Image: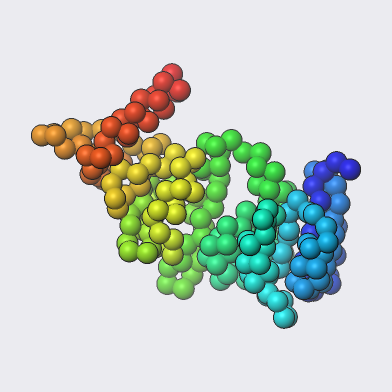
Amino acid sequence: MSGLRVLVVDDERPALDELTYLLDADDRIGEVIACQSATDGLRTLREREVDCVFLDIQMPGLSGLELAEVLGRFKQPPPVVFVTAHEQHAVDAFDLRAVDYVLKPVRPDRLAEAVRRVLGGASPQQAATDTPIAVERGGVTRFVDRGDITHVEAQGDYARLHTTTGDAYLVRVPLTTLEEEWAGAGFHRIHRSLLVALAHVTEVRSDAGRTSVLVGDTELPVSRRHTRALRDVLVRRARAGS
């Protein structure tokens, strides 16, 4: 059988049927397995291998977030796409490394984009731009494109994301975690408390043995231990683009 084998979990029968129908209509999907509870979904996952899980969040008994936590302990956890009517769980969902977060009512084009993310069809440059980062401000969750983030500043166990618009958002993720997860998207450590998006670096400055980079109108310090590595990676990027 060609195509993805997908598990869909939703306690509401109409929503489950609609999502199953939409996924069945996608040529990239080979089989859709439908379950009406997270418990049944977990039982299915222990009996059968699937390529990804489309998962509601608010369900009686075991919630979608709790099921995702269990899946995260699998030796080879399947990618998870949350499909929900509730925006307020977005930060928790991405903390669990969800591939995508789709809001109900589900649009076919938005669902198709989620399948594309599961398949990983984007190039690294596209992924850097397309990946939505869930952030909170004043009790409201919004999504910021990772490609719009210029640099990241450590704030204890949190990180502050600075964007091209001048806005900044605090996320509950340590800088070391973002350094590891975003390295492939062009984020580079320049200081013990700073990551910079190399695509947004417009100038490297040296003065009296001190190095800094210019990102927009912001000048960021580069520590001595990171200076050589930064120059090397910028040279490689320049050669690759020439």
Which sits in the foreground, 158 or 202? 158
The quarter holding residue 50 reads bottom right
| Furthest residue toward left | 208
Residue 96 visible to an observer of this rendering: yes
**Residue drawn 86% across and 51% down?**
31
Q: Quadrant of the C terminus?
A: top left
The quarter holding residue 81 reads bottom right
Which sits in the foreground, 7 or 75? 75
Task: Give the x, y percent position of residue 39.
Answer: 77, 73
Instruction: Decide if residue 17 is on the left or right side of residue 158.
Output: right
**Vertical order, 7 against 163 (above or below):** below
**Residue drawn 33% across and 57% down?**
154
**Residue drawn 56% across and 42% down?**
127
| Furthest residue toward bottom | 61
Which sits in the foreground, 71 or 113? 71
Task: Give the x, y percent position of residue 32.
Answer: 84, 56
Which sits in the foreground, 75 or 188? 75
**Residue drawn 45% across and 23% down?**
241
| Furthest residue toward top | 242
Task: Give the x, y percent position of residue 41.
Answer: 78, 67
